Amino acid sequence: MISEQFGRDIETGAPIRVAVADGKVVSLGRPDTSPEDIWISPGWLDIQVNGYAGHDPNDPEAGAVATAGTVQALWRYGVTGTLITICTASEADIIKACRAVADACDADHLVNASVIGIHVEGPNISPEDGPRGAHPLQHVRPPDVAEFMRWQEAARGRIRMVTLSPEYPGAPDYVHALVADGIVVSIGHTAADSEQIRAVTDAGATYSTHLGNGAHATIRRHPNYVWDQLADDRLSAGFIFDGHHLPPAVMRTVVRAKGVERTILVSDAVSMAGQPPGRYRLFDGIDVELRRDGRLDLAGTPLLAGATTALPTCVGNAIRHAGVAVRDAVQMVTANPSRILGLGQRAGHERLCEGMAAHLTLFRLTPPGDTLEIVATIVEGSVVYQAT
């Protein structure tokens, strides 16, 4: 059975008809008219999600339901594919969390289609206050290839990205080994110097995790690890454009430095995302406070404890504050993350074309053109979210 979606092509703005059957896009048409206010793009990717709507895949006791609940909550925000992000913890807890993600994927084909893989953020990060962020100090440790292989075995091969700090003596060799195994290695939560950053980039690191955050409150003017990563064209970079992590002037500056093609927007959402304001306790005992404006702080401090803003707001902020066109802002959550992960055009996240997996995001722009409302989310041809 063939279903059809009508709207405006995200690349050209022209009317488009997208015909879907058996989980694939079977044809693209150019009708004379389509809904003027609905845009159709390839499915959106969020490659850094720690949880959502009370679901926390980082909780080793949460089980597969945490991953399924996170994915299903993300569908409301146009996200058709994600990297479930597992953060710094003991080896046993990372293994349990990775296994639970794999179990969720094995249990539901639409969850499996939406979980592009796992992003392990840490534990090989800087132990220093500031760069470490909210990651627990007691579990920060040097990289170990044998440990990574144990994570990957538990994940049943689903780990696609690892974030580490280059400041460890064995970091370049670790990066080289992971890249040889097909893993995207990212620099993040680091206090590394220029030589250390260059060494892991030479070894194959290709990405920077939420660049500009997970950093000291005060750093050397120059050189420093932010400039080093911004300047290296071998590194694409993820940014949290939620309005709390980076101010508008920084949003505009980093896009100009990296260029649209190397800029990736991430939510970095945690389990409090989509929850009412108030105090919460993370599974590891850390108290946080969610403010009415969506900012999440470590309780009793002005320090950020994570993000709670969905991807459409980040895309809207790229349009509003970085001054990019809607097409370019959407590229930052479709083609750019797809390419850094090596998914390929047929995976359904790069451009609308016949034969691609039918992952589609339909959205509406509201005046003055920088606020996005998700109209429908389609995963492998199934409408998993439809606005009422």
Image (cartoon, helix red, strand yellow):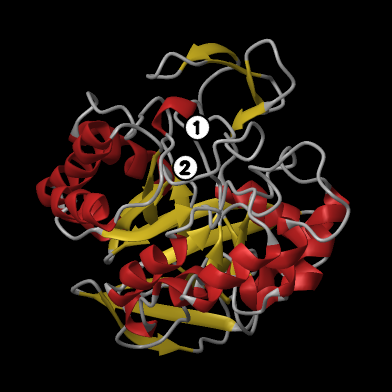
**Position in image of residue 172 (x %, y %):** 45, 67
Kindly state the secondary structure of the residue where label 1 is placed. loop
Q: Residue at x 50, y 45 (%)?
A: 125
Q: In the shown orientation, is residue 105 left or right of residue 170? A: left
Point 65% across, 51% down: residue: 314
Residue at 68% of width from left, 58% of height from top?
Answer: 193
How busy is the neighbourhood of tag 2: few (under 14 within 10 Å), some, or many (20 plus)? few
Looking at the rendered structure, which numbered label has been put on residue 193? none
Q: What's the residue at 44%, 36% (across, down)?
A: 140
Q: Amino acid at mark 1?
A: His
Nearest the viewer among 366 and 57 is: 57
The residue that label 2 is drawn on is: 388
**Marker disc for residue 135:** 1
Label 2: state its secondary structure. loop
Circle 2/circle 1 CB separation < 8 Å: no
Q: Quadrant of residue 57?
A: top left
Which of label 2 and label 1 is nearer to you? 1
> Which picture quadrant has residue 9?
bottom right
